[in-house]
Structure formats: C-alpha cells, structure tokens
C-alpha cells in the first residue's frame, strides 16, 4: 500500500505515513473510485488533467498518475479521431467532387428544352 498524499510505500499496519505524516485511511474502494473519476476527468479535459498532474506529481503522486493517464488516453483518442477524419476526407473526396460536377450537368428537361425549345 502507498500513501495517497506522497506515494511512499507503507507497511500494512501503518496508521500514519512515516514521510509526510498524513493519516492513512484503509478505504481502498473510495480511493479507487477517486482515481477512476480523476482518470475520466483527464480523458475529457486533457489540459486540466496535465495541469493537475504537474501540480500533484510531488505531493500526491497517486492522483497525479491517474490524471496523467486519463489525459494521455484522451489525447491519443482525439488524435486517432483526427487521423480517421482526414483519411475519410481523402478517400471520399473524389466521389464528392463527382457529385458536385454531376449536379452542374443539365437535366433531361433542360436538354429537351434546348433541343426543341417552346415548339411543343
């Protein structure tokens, strides 16, 4: 087990951190939920996650690590989406251009009017 404040490895029987003196709570489930929430926050707001990582990396390394990983996953996800959109634009650009060109060609009615005029 590690100190949630400074990250120092603790004995299982420790009630206080020997390095920073913070009282150790044995509610690991609550800390796991907090870490997951911080990771999710970092995923959706990567800039905030990186800022929190820089602020917390010395005093609260466990929380800092969660925000760092969430931020990195969020940035990678966004990068993959951007690359995918660019590839789709490149792949489907030609059919879109053909569609635009095809719309500028005359319709059957316009061709008929050009050939026969108002004679009918």
Image: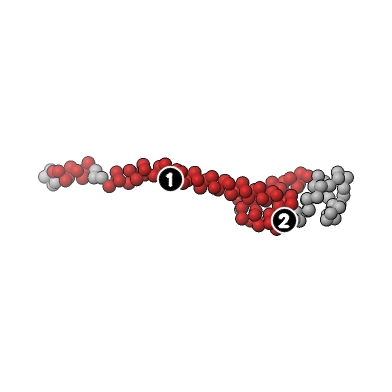
Q: Is residue 91 left or right of residue 58?
A: left
For image coordinates 32% across by 46% down, the residue present is: 100
Instruction: Characterize the local packing of mark 1: few (<14), some (14-19) or many (20 or more) Cα atoms within 10 angstroms.
Output: few
Using the rendered image of the protein, determine whether residue 54 is visible from the camera's viewpoint: yes
Residue 106 point in image, percent of width and height: 24, 45
Q: Is residue 96 left or right of residue 44?
A: left
Using the rendered image of the protein, determine whether residue 37 is visible from the camera's viewpoint: no
For image coordinates 75% across by 47% down, the residue present is: 31
Residue 32 point in image, percent of width and height: 74, 45
Q: CA distance from mark 2 to mark 1?
A: 41 Å
For image coordinates 42% across by 44% down, the residue present is: 90
Give the image quarter of residue 57. bottom right
Instruction: Characterize the local packing of mark 2: few (<14), some (14-19) or many (20 or more) Cα atoms within 10 angstroms.
Output: some
SS assignment at label 2:
helix
Q: Are discs 2 and 1 less than 8 Å apart at CB? A: no
Return the residue at label 1. 89
Nearest the viewer among 119 and 19 is 19
Task: Give the numbered dot on residue 56.
Answer: 2
In the picture, which quadrant includes the C terminus? top left
Residue 118 point in image, percent of width and height: 13, 47
Nearest the viewer among 88 and 28 is 88
Give the image quarter of residue 102. top left
């Amino acid at each position: 087990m590690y100190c949630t404040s400074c990250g120092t490895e603790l004995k299982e029987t420790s009630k206080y951190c020997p390095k920073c003196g913070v009282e150790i709570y044995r509610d690991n489930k609550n800390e796991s939920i907090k870490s997951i929430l911080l990771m999710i926050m970092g995923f959706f707001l990567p800039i905030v996650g990186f800022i929190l990582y820089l602020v917390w990396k010395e005093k609260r390394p466990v929380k800092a690590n969660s925000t760092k990983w969430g931020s990195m996953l969020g940035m990678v996800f966004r990068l993959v989406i951007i690359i995918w959109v660019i590839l789709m634009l490149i792949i489907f650009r030609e059919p879109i251009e053909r569609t635009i060109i095809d719309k500028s060609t005359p319709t059957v009615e316009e061709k008929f009017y050009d050939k026969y005029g108002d004679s009918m």
